[in-house]
Amino acid sequence: MQDDETAEHPARRHWRSFPIYVGAGGIATASHYAVTIAAVERFAVAPIAATVMGFLTGSAIKYGLNYSAAFRSRTPHAHAVPRFLIALAVMLGLNTLIFAVLERGVGLHYLLAQVVTTILLIPPGYLLHRQWVFR
C-alpha cells in the first residue's frame, strides 16, 4: 500500500513542497546573507569568497529543513547526505559563477548580485533536491 505522499499526484506534491522549500530557503538565505555581509563589511573578505562562506552556512541549515519539512523525505541519511553534498557542489559552483559574473563582470553591487543569483537558483535547486536528493 502506498503512503499519502507517494499516492498523491506529483503536481499536488509540488504545490505543497515548493512553498515550504522556498520558506526553508528563506531561512537558509538569511544566514547566507548575514555571513556574506559580515565577511565583506566587518572582515574585509572579498565578495566572491564571502558568498562561498555564506552559501556553505546556509546549506548546513537547509539540509535538515528540506529533509524533514519541504520534502518529508524517508530516504535514509546515508543515501541523502552524499546526494546533498553532490547537489551542494553543483549549486555552489553555479552560485559562485553567476555571482562572479554579476559582481565582477557586470559590476553590480555584491548584495544586488547575490539577490539576482539567489532568485535564478531557486528553480534548478528545487528540481535537483525534489527529483534526486530527497526522492
Image (tube, helix red, strand yellow):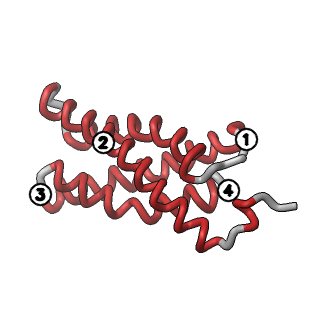
What residue is at 49 percent from the left and 60 percent from the top?
A: 126
The numbered mark, 1 or 2, whose residue comes first in the sequence reads 2
The numbered mark, 3 or 1, whose residue comes first in the sequence reads 1
Residue of label 3 = 107
The numbered mark, 4 or 2, whose residue comes first in the sequence reads 2
Element class at badge 1: loop
The numbered mark, 1 or 4, whose residue comes first in the sequence reads 1
The amino acid type, in three-letter code, at marker 3 is Gly
Q: Is residue 90 left or right of residue 29?
A: right
Q: Is residue 65 left or right of residue 92?
A: right
Q: Are marks 1 and 2 in contact (CB under 8 Å)?
A: no
Residue of label 2 = 30
The amino acid type, in three-letter code, at marker 4 is Arg
Spot occupied by residue 89 in the image (x, y as percentages of width and height): 49, 47
Q: Is residue 2 above or below residue 38?
A: below
Q: Quadrant of the N terminus?
A: bottom right
Q: Quadrant of the C terminus?
A: bottom right
Residue of label 4 = 135
Question: Spatial distance from mark 1 to mark 2, Cα to Cα?
Answer: 28 Å
Residue of label 1 = 76
What residue is at 36 percent from the left and 48 percent from the top?
A: 26
Pick the front one: 77 or 41: 77
The amino acid type, in three-letter code, at marker 2 is Ala
Q: Nearer the viewer, mark 3 or mark 4?
A: 4
Pick the front one: 95 or 76: 76
Question: Spatial distance from mark 3 to mark 4, Cα to Cα?
Answer: 39 Å
Question: Spatial distance from mark 2 to mark 3, Cα to Cα?
Answer: 23 Å
The amino acid type, in three-letter code, at marker 1 is Pro
